[in-house]
Image (cartoon, helix red, strand yellow):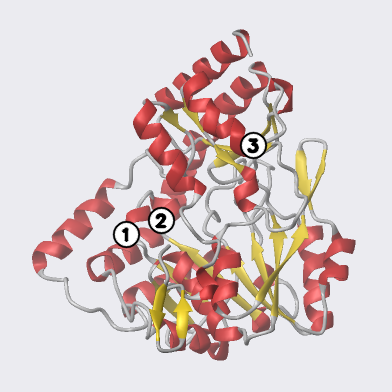
């Protein structure tokens, strides 16, 4: 980066808050996939299609002229559909008038929440590893992200309640809770949520949840894990902002339509920030998504079956290739331990993997905040066509059988 020299001396052109936020490993790995022809199991870009009726509905809206600014808080139809969804699935009541806000994707909702709730010097807790945007937007707010490690037990990631209690200081303001969790595929259990809620109530914190994978919990309805919003626990609705979006559920990540629900004062804080970020967006998508959200259960059930098959194919293939997988109960991703291939450094492993095996993955170190975090984990995506997953598995097994 070149420096600029003015009357006040030499300085870098970019603000100091951007230091260290250069080209991400996601961009690097995507370019490696393109340049090598490797199967890209890196980024979570779904290849599984979207509801036909939803796509046709949006096309009709565009042709009908729904291409100008929608209302700043989102169309009434989508806000009402989000409120109805929360009531139907979780028994949570929200007024669509002032307790639901439509955002430009979940990331804007999360950024708006931290910018709207945190002052410089505040601390934000998040479970580590975590989505890389959390630390960045906390920094933009002048706050500090404090990582609370998830620990491994067998093939699962679990809450360390003692570490959570120890992480709280007088400066702690917000706790970011991501469940179902990216990048681990963990679903927080009822007992874990109760433990988190106890800490939050004890210290008077605000919770910002990231629930974008809420419909993608495998085994739902068959005795498997269950997604439970922490807002539904006693004393938690009034201190929780719940964030979700359409992108992962309907396979439309490029539309960038999300939403946030919560008590009116907390939602107003997000809206106060959002009006000076995107103001509003997604006009032709919003009412179409409102109609799709009303019937999301049927669509999501089939999507879960497809993703569950892919997860099993990938996990079994990783095991055969000697890359020990961890259990993924939800979402798009599987974590794998690379040490059996003679590697301790996930970044180096992922840079070499496209040439060695013709597969792209993401080093989990990209998601860790704390120093000294494990470096031997990598993340593989299975939100792909089954043929792509099978091709990647075949390539990994062949690489495992060859020279190392």
Say left or right for 93 vs 290.
right
Q: Nearer the viewer, residue 141 or 63?
A: 141
Q: Is residue 354 above or below residue 287?
A: above
- Residue drawn where x is 67% and y is 82% of the image: 239
Q: Residues within 10 Å of mark 1 (few under 14, many from 20)?
A: some
The x and y percentages for residue 263 are 57, 85
Quadrant the C terminus occupies: top right
**Residue 194 position (above or below residue 173):** above
Q: Secondary structure at mark 2?
A: helix
Task: Give the mark, 2 or 1, whose residue is nearer the N terminus.
Answer: 2
Q: Is residue 34 left or right of residue 329?
A: left
Q: Quadrant of residue 275?
A: bottom left
Q: Is residue 110 visible?
A: no
- Tell me the CA gap for discs 2 and 1: 7 Å
Task: Give the residue number, with chain letter if any, for mark 2.
Answer: 247
Position of 333 with respect to 74 (left or right) is right
Taking the spot 40% from the left edge, 30% from the top edge, the residue there is 385
Give the Cα separation between the discs numbered 3 and 2: 28 Å
Percent position of residue 213, x then y: 54, 54
Q: Quick one: 187 or 157, which is closer to the camera?
A: 157
Q: Nearer the viewer, residue 369 or 291?
A: 369
Within 10 angstroms of label 3, few (less than 14), some, or many (20 or more) residues?
many
| Dot 3: element | helix
Q: Report x, y in % for residue 149.
A: 78, 56
Which mark is first along the chain, 3 or 1? 1
Task: Provide the residue designation for mark 1.
Answer: 255
The residue under label 3 is: 346
| Front disc: 1 or 3 | 3
**What is the crowding at mark 2: few (fewer than 14 residues within 10 Å), some, or many (at least 20)?**
many
Name the quadrant of the N terminus: bottom left
């Amino acid at each position: 980066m070149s420096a600029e020299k003015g009357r006040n001396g030499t300085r870098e052109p970019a603000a100091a808050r951007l230091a260290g936020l250069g080209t991400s490993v996601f961009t690097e790995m995507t370019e490696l996939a393109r340049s090598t022809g490797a199967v890209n199991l890196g980024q979570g870009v779904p290849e599984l299609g979207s509801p036909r009726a939803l796509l046709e509905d949006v096309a009709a809206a565009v042709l009908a002229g729904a291409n100008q600014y929608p209302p700043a808080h989102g169309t009434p139809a989508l806000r009402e559909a989000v409120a109805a969804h929360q009531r139907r699935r979780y028994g949570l009541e929200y007024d669509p008038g002032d307790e639901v806000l439509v955002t430009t994707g979940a990331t804007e909702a999360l950024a708006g929440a931290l910018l709207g709730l945190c002052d410089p010097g505040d601390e934000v807790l998040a479970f580590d590893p975590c989505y890389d945007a959390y630390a960045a937007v906390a920094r933009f707010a002048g706050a500090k992200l404090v990582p609370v490690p998830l620990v491994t037990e067998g093939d699962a990631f679990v809450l360390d309640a003692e570490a959570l209690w120890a992480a709280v200081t007088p400066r702690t303001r917000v706790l970011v809770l991501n469940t179902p969790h990216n990048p681990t595929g963990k679903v927080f259990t009822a007992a874990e949520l109760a433990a988190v809620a106890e800490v939050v109530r004890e210290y008077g914190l605000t919770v910002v949840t990231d629930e974008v994978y809420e419909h993608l919990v495998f085994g739902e309805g068959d005795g498997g894990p269950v997604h439970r919003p922490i807002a539904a626990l006693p004393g938690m609705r009034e201190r929780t902002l719940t964030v979700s979006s359409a992108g992962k559920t309907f396979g439309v990540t490029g539309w960038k339509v999300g939403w946030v629900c919560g008590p009116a004062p907390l939602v107003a804080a997000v809206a106060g920030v959002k009006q000076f970020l995107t103001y509003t967006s997604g006009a032709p998508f919003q009412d179409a998504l409102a109609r799709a959200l009303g019937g999301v259960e049927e669509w999501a059930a089939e999507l879960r079956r497809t993703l569950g098959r892919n997860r099993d194919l990938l996990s079994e293939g990783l095991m055969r290739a000697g890359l020990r997988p961890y259990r993924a109960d939800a979402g798009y991703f599987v974590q794998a331990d690379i040490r059996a291939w003679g590697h301790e450094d996930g970044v180096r492993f992922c840079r070499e993997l496209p040439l060695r095996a013709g597969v792209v993955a993401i080093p989990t170190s990209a998601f860790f905040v704390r120093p000294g975090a494990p470096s031997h984990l990598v993340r593989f995506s299975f939100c792909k066509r089954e043929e792509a997953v099978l091709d990647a598995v075949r390539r990994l097994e062949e690489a495992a059988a060859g020279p190392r």
